[in-house]
Amino acid sequence: MIGLETMTNMVQKYYGTDSSKSSDFGTRIMIWSIIVLSFAASLCPVYSVSSETAAMSVENGNYRVAFVKSTFTGAAYNNAFYPFYNKYNYIEEGVKVYKNLDKLTGYLSDAPANNPDMFKWIDGLVSHTAKLLQNSTISVLEDAEINDGKLFKKNGTNAYDILIFGHEEYATKAMYDNIRKFVARGGVALFLDGNIFYAEVTYDPTDQSVTLKKGHSWVYNGIYATRSVYERWANETSSWIGSNYYEAFGPANKYKNGTYIYNYLNDPFDYSPVRFEDQYVTNPAVNIIWDYQYSDPEHKIATYWKPFGAGKVIVMGIFFERILKDPRFLDFYDKLLTEYALSNPNTIPEFPTAILAMATLMTAVLLLYNANYVKLLLKRHYHHS
């Protein structure tokens, strides 16, 4: 990586420090611009993606689509996690909890005790999608399969073109990394619910259980639990997915009479009264598909897509399960698939805001560096006038 000092030395070596010695101001600007852009590019993430890796299986519309059954999240709602959260809600930061730690382990179930209908949306949407994409191969994956690397073929290429997620609140580190790698290699991840990757768990395949590791305001080391971050990968998720969790339905967003302080002013699905767990945009690199015009100016809630590596993510922004039976949602879902998910993978490289700021700063330095030469030109102009 080229540093600012190195670049400055390069220009000084070849063009001198005295601006008056240069006879071509335009050439100097061009050289500096090339160096600035090269420096910025050197900071950008590089994804080595072959055309085979990035390409979707689009022959005759034969897309490889996988719906993800969020069984790790289901385990957390299977008489687990939440009894502990509620019992120790009063605990302050720094206090160690040694009791009731068995509640931080949950067991996988097709009908979690606290949300037995959790996975019922999958069959209906699979059937709907099969009619929409008649030549496609549609599968259902479970979290454990993603954890074990089943998103990829033996040669490392993506085994699927599109992943469709529901309530994916809890994930292992391996699962999180595999999904990010899947997108970077040209895949599309469509997140239909909010509360994405809020907490990290560990997975034990022997007894089919997950145990909280970090997130949801706790960290558990196997001996005791203590207060920690709410959203486990907040910065990382903002960077590559483009948003973070927002609790629009919570008591902090209600008046004393129970009505909501903020509302969705552009709400085609009548979602406002049934609102649940949303995502709010925290990355300026997203491309808005539908802005719900949430009236809290600090939280933009929108359906959007965002490029990442050779692929893209699409985020519904609201909790789709609350509007699943609305035909207007199904029309919108069809549009998300056909006009956004199934278009050619976006290959525009990410250009983080910090790098743009660095490039802008260096351009300012460039102009200041040439200020003496500009003054010299003006002096000569008025001298000959």
Image (cartoon, rainbow, N blue to C red):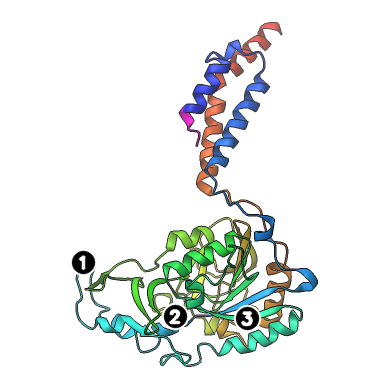
Name the element at disc 1.
Answer: loop
Quadrant holding the C terminus: top right
Q: Is mark 3 in CB contact (under 8 Å) with mark 2?
A: no
Q: What amino acid is found at the position of numbered circle 1 in the picture? A: Gly
- How much space separates mark 1 and mark 2, taking CA atoms? 27 Å
Mark 3 surroundings within 10 Å by alpha-carbon count, few (fewer than 14), some (14 through 19), many (20 or more): few
Q: Which residue is mark 2?
A: 73
Q: What amino acid is found at the position of numbered circle 3 in the picture? A: Ser
Name the element at disc 3.
Answer: strand
Q: Which residue is mark 1?
A: 94
Q: Nearer the viewer, residue 316 or 372?
A: 316
Q: Earlier in the sequence, mark 3 or mark 2?
A: 2
Q: Nearer the viewer, mark 3 or mark 2?
A: 3
Q: What residue do we see at 65% from left, 27% from top? A: 30
Picture quarter containing residue 22? top right
Label of residue 139 in the image: 3
